[in-house]
Amino acid sequence: MGKSKAKRFRSAPFSPAGPQRAAGGEGPAGEDGDGGSSASELLEKLQHPSADVREFACASISKMLQQKHAIPAFLQRDVVRCLGPMLLDQSLAVRETAAGALRNLSACGGFEVCDDMVTKDIMTPLVALLKECSAGLEANEVSPTKCKDTKKNCVEDIANEAVNVLWNVCECNGTAVSIFNKEGCLDVVLQYLKKFSTNVDLAISVAHCLQTVTEDNPELLSSFNTSAHQVLESIMLSQDNTMEHILLRTLSAGSVWNIKDTIPSSSQANTINAILKIFSESLVVDAGETVIHMKEAETQRLKLTAEAETEENVSDTIDNSVLKEDDEMEEPPKGKVKRENDVSDLLPSDKWELKQVTALLMAQQTALEIIVNMCCSEDPSDDEWEELSSSDESDLFMENSYDEGSGPPMSPLCLSADVHAALMNNLIPKKILEKTAFPNSVAVDICTHSPSWKPLIRKMNTVQCRALTCLHSILLVSDVDCLGGASTLQSLAQHLSQLVFSQSEFPTHTEFLEAVTSAMRALLQTMASKNISQCMTPEQLMSLCEAGVHSSNISVRVNVVSILGIAGSVLAKIEDTAETLKMIGKFLLEVAMKDSSLVVAGEALDALFDVFADGTEAEKAAVQIKLLPALKEFQPVFKIRMRKEGKGQYSTDQLCVLDNVKMNLRRFIAYQETLGGKKTT
């Protein structure tokens, strides 16, 4: 029913984290099945005169709040109002652990919990803490405030936890964003962002937060002065090549895209090109190979560390008197492996390699999501489009579609010329297509056999799905010539088919199915509009649709029905296709009559109208499957379903579309009756 819509993405909520040092030992987190008494005891300890006890209580609460089932017990005991004052506790360690607990509460609790946090005025102490930390940063440049762990800067660590709380609540709650605007929080977090060269973790947290608060927030735009632009520009121009810095640049580029209206029109083309250059640098990295390389590096590092520790232990057992007697023997090498001089201390922490890969995958996911938003940013509310996602890949797609010397062609729909030119200049579409491939099997196997690395499999799959969605958006906003011509689209169709049918079993992962079927739908629409022959066989189409129509996801069902309608309308123009059209017609009739969703049923009817609209083969097939009697019988049933199910279950836009389907059903029946009358005369 109408065109498919390129899905817009919002910045993703951050995963729970927070200080764990006090919560790592024995404590209340493992006690009490329902968490009720533990919650009460811990919240009471927040009022204890000893800072160590308050810190332990905050850290234990933080650990418990990572378990969703424990959150209700704390909410019932007003955890937000209990932890809020701890953000301004005299003890810096208490401030950090309290902020970590609130971070986990906001990340694991979801939208409703974040709303509750704002309602209970968490923003007042949070903003006060953020401003205090900002003021403290300058003092720390002269005399850094150290935490118990002397390698950590306490003010920056507190700021990092607080920024994550701010990010989470602003992601979920509009009031929090308004408070961010009114309290001048932009200047505060930009102060933190300036620390990117020495504290990339803090900078990444701020960049995540900035990307969230700058999205669809015109009130904030006036706060972006020259100084603010310079901070973001300095990050985008930085040359650090770690995966964390790639993520930082990607997030900062996303914020610049969100505030593009503050950039002079004369500079916008260059800015957009700079943004997409950063995305290109992120997408060009092979995540699978990076996983393999980083896992090897981790294994080697841990091996060397273990050997060094073994050598140290052996050296410690040597009789010191023997060493003294041997005048020619030099100082044993134990000095090289002592903790204070251990070379491994100069290396990253135990999870450094995993952290790098995680940052890369987040950077790639973020870049793809922002490109999707770029493709539909100028017309996001077109209610003719349905909210579907998808995309896919082809090694040939876009490879030679643009000659830099000739200048970029104007693109249709909502894609601006500047964005289109930057996409082509940076070969973004080709890199997107590479990301739509299934994750590297060797990398997946490595992650499967390592518990700490196993979550990366899901992240790699998410990048693939985002790439498919991104490709879908590009298909919707580019014409055939920009896409590389008919042969490229046919190659792309073959590739999409391979993604679906190359596996030993039909894919069942909902996000992937939605993405790949949406890509097929957009591609087939484009090919059909230009009379480009399609490469999928009727058998493949039916196999896809028969599997997809049983999906629990409505978008998947809508997509496969639409795909069948597009393919059928093309086949109807070809001779000797009546048998295939009969098969398609029976399938669509069954979906229209039996699917539980009116949206899917309406799409199936629309597809029937397209397939049997015209052509000798279509007329022949329609008679043989008794299409007209079936539709006449179904027409009153459809009207009744709309009256009974329509109100309350479907949006105004969906009901409007369904009304059009109902009207078209009446017209189509009249049209079929006319065809029957002509044959009898």
Image (cartoon, rainbow, N blue to C red):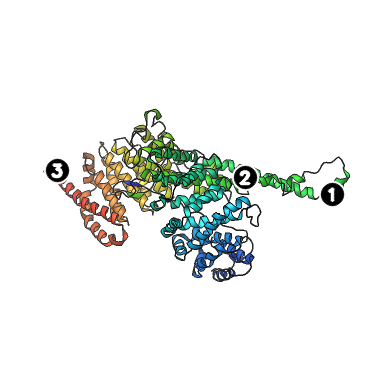
Q: SS of the residue at dot 3? A: helix
The answer to whether mark 2 and mark 3 are in CB contact below 8 A is: no
Q: Position of residue 37 (x, y in %)?
A: 56, 71
**Of 170 and 578, the residue lying toward us:** 170
Q: Position of residue 136 (x, y in %)?
A: 57, 55
Closer to the chain start, of discs 1 and 2, is: 2
Closer to the chain start, of discs 2 and 3, is: 2
Q: Which residue is most to the right? A: 325
Q: Is residue 7 left or right of residue 124?
A: left
Q: Which picture quadrant has residue 575?
A: top left
The crowd level at tag 2 (other Cα within 10 Å; few <14, some 14-19, many 20+) is some
Q: How many marks?
A: 3
The label on residue 501 is none
* Residue type pointed to by label 1: Asn
The crowd level at tag 3 (other Cα within 10 Å; few <14, some 14-19, many 20+) is few
- Residue under pointer 3: 679
What residue is at 60 percent from the left and 47 percent from the top? Answer: 352
What residue is at 46 percent from the left and 66 percent from the top? Answer: 120
Q: Which picture quadrant has residue 62?
A: bottom right
What residue is at 29 percent from the left and 61 percent from the top? Answer: 645
- Residue under pointer 1: 320
- Residue under pointer 2: 298
Q: Is residue 460 above or below residue 175?
A: above
